[in-house]
Amino acid sequence: MTLIEALDYAAVVVFAITGALAASRAQLDIVGFAFVASLTAVGGGTMRDLLLKRDAVFWVENTNYIFFAVLAAFVVFFAAHLFESRLKALMWLDAVALAVAVSAGTGVAMELDQLPQVVIIMGIATGCFGGLMRDVVCNEVPLVLKQGELYASAAFAGAFAAVIASFITPSPLAITAACAATTFVLRAGSLKFGWSLPVYKSRPPRA
Amino acid sequence: MTLIEALDYAAVVVFAITGALAASRAQLDIVGFAFVASLTAVGGGTMRDLLLKRDAVFWVENTNYIFFAVLAAFVVFFAAHLFESRLKALMWLDAVALAVAVSAGTGVAMELDQLPQVVIIMGIATGCFGGLMRDVVCNEVPLVLKQGELYASAAFAGAFAAVIASFITPSPLAITAACAATTFVLRAGSLKFGWSLPVYKSRPPRA
Amino acid sequence: MTLIEALDYAAVVVFAITGALAASRAQLDIVGFAFVASLTAVGGGTMRDLLLKRDAVFWVENTNYIFFAVLAAFVVFFAAHLFESRLKALMWLDAVALAVAVSAGTGVAMELDQLPQVVIIMGIATGCFGGLMRDVVCNEVPLVLKQGELYASAAFAGAFAAVIASFITPSPLAITAACAATTFVLRAGSLKFGWSLPVYKSRPPRA
């Protein structure tokens, strides 16, 4: 298994769990769990593969990804009650998935010799779109747009770190580590300590 | 006309009608009717064609599909008041469209010699995404996510039936019939008799 | 620079500004501004390029587009307070962007020798989908679906005008002018004077 495949698998499984947790909050049946989990799991990578015109979408070429996403959904269906707070679990697992998916996105773009700015965008897109689809479909406020939280910013910083690292070292593992660590630390710091960037403030905005 | 073309036409027209009915509930003008009807009509098949990397998206290659979708929208614009309940009509026509679209999705995937699991996913995606886009755009609760109803489940069962049938018979017509009948019977049973799978239950979920 | 590139640049920058204004209404941070601005800026054109199976998505091939979208987002982040009403500014800039994007969509489709009906659809899709994504993601009522306003209708009329013009003159500039002027005049007339098409009316619709 290549490093990128390993990252794709990890992102798929963790995002699938977050999708299933969102499905549990929407009180869906087991097929609904599998549906939302799969959508969340492969949404970002599918976007990446379509935008980069890869020969095949990763999970159509290798259906194990969907198998694992559905498996994760089933496990959550029977085990979600073990989480003390499913929302909290969702947000922390989403942070892990974000870190892994940004790495997978930048990794694929680098393998295809894309320019640094495309690498960064693919990192952000791969990281953010699965969760965005999950939240739009499940009618939750998209995490990527929550005020006063680092999300797209964490993805951006991680993808940026990957590009910097790629100038220093040729090792895919080191690049991946730099990317995932940066993304996760920023997102986790935002969840745990409220780290944020200043938001746009104005008089009552909906006028 | 091939069987798959016939299925695509049928799915396009019936989904277009459901899109136009949603537009009538949102009180749009006649171009809005055509817009939502077209989006609903070709959304699922477009997703299928992009994911499978077909040479061309079906309605770009053959624009008759859009013509019929727009025509259906116009008819509904002038005739929607004839429906006693437009929501009920929308749901029943959506059930027909779902059954036909799942068959069209599995049919295309089988023709491209995809693996059974890809066939099943393309059936579900083709069936569900047009309606999902319609509901997201029109701000209705997505049918695919309504609690206690078989929707994705009906699509899954129909696509599964198509795969089973394909091991028994080479006849595309028989495979299609098995798929459409299974999907429609389950979805109709859910609408009429409240058939459902157990949903995930928990203490108040938004905490 | 070709005419189509110029149109793509103009549409990207103006749509990016509308995306950033929507981000300001949602009170996001600067990276959120860049995210929503980019999504709005390239959403319609990306849809067009995927549907037409162009060799590469325009902004992956030439990343200047994203650069300008992000730049526009930064400018708005620091200057949005200068607008007396950001909603009004958003709507008028959106009208400009719509006119330019419809022209860019029809132009690309004509260059690829597509049929008139495909040209029209690509005009509408390129014009409408960026703003639609912006509104769905930012949880605003999609402009394209606002009751009693010309939006998809203006896009349709503009694309139709482009097709008519292409039968009269081979000049891309003249075709573009006809398309953009038609779209903008109708959309502006709708905003300023309340021009509209009759909408579907019925007894209380949500029953």
Image (cartoon, coloured by chain):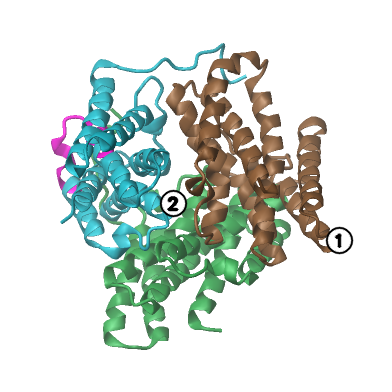
Chain colours: A brown, B cyan, C green
Of residues C145 and A39, the one drawn nearer to the viewer in this rendering:
A39
Q: Which mark is residue C111?
A: none
Instruction: Name the element at disc 1.
Output: helix
| Identity of the residue drawn at 30% across and 71% down | C160
Residue carrying label 2: B51
For label 1, the crowd category at 10 Å Cα-Cα, with few meaning under 14, some 14 to 19 and many 20 or more, is few
Chain containing the residue with disc 1: A
| Identity of the residue drawn at 31% across and 58% down | B58
Q: Is residue A92 left or right of residue A48?
A: right
Residue carrying label 1: A168
Q: Is residue B81 magenta?
A: yes
| Identity of the residue drawn at 32% across and 53% down | B35
- Residue at the top extreme, as displayed: B203
Counting from the top left corner in percent of width and height, residue B174 is at 18, 38
Counting from the top left corner in percent of width and height, residue A44 is at 57, 47
Q: CA distance from mark 1 to mark 2?
A: 36 Å
Q: Is residue C181 left or right of residue A139?
A: left
Counting from the top left corner in percent of width and height, residue C108 is at 42, 74
Compared to residue C137, the image places residue A15 above or below, namely above
Q: Residue B166: name its quadrant.
A: top left
Of residues B175 and B28, the one drawn nearer to the viewer in this rendering:
B175
Q: Residue B96: name its quadrant.
A: top left
Of residues B196 and A25, the one drawn nearer to the viewer in this rendering:
B196
Amino acid beneath label 2: Leu
Q: Is residue C33 left or right of residue B113?
A: right
Amino acid beneath label 1: Ile
Instruction: Name the element at disc 2.
Output: helix
Counting from the top left corner in percent of width and height, residue C125 is at 40, 61
Which region shows up in magenta? Answer: B77-98
Q: State how many labels appear.
A: 2
| Identity of the residue drawn at 26% across and 83% down | C167
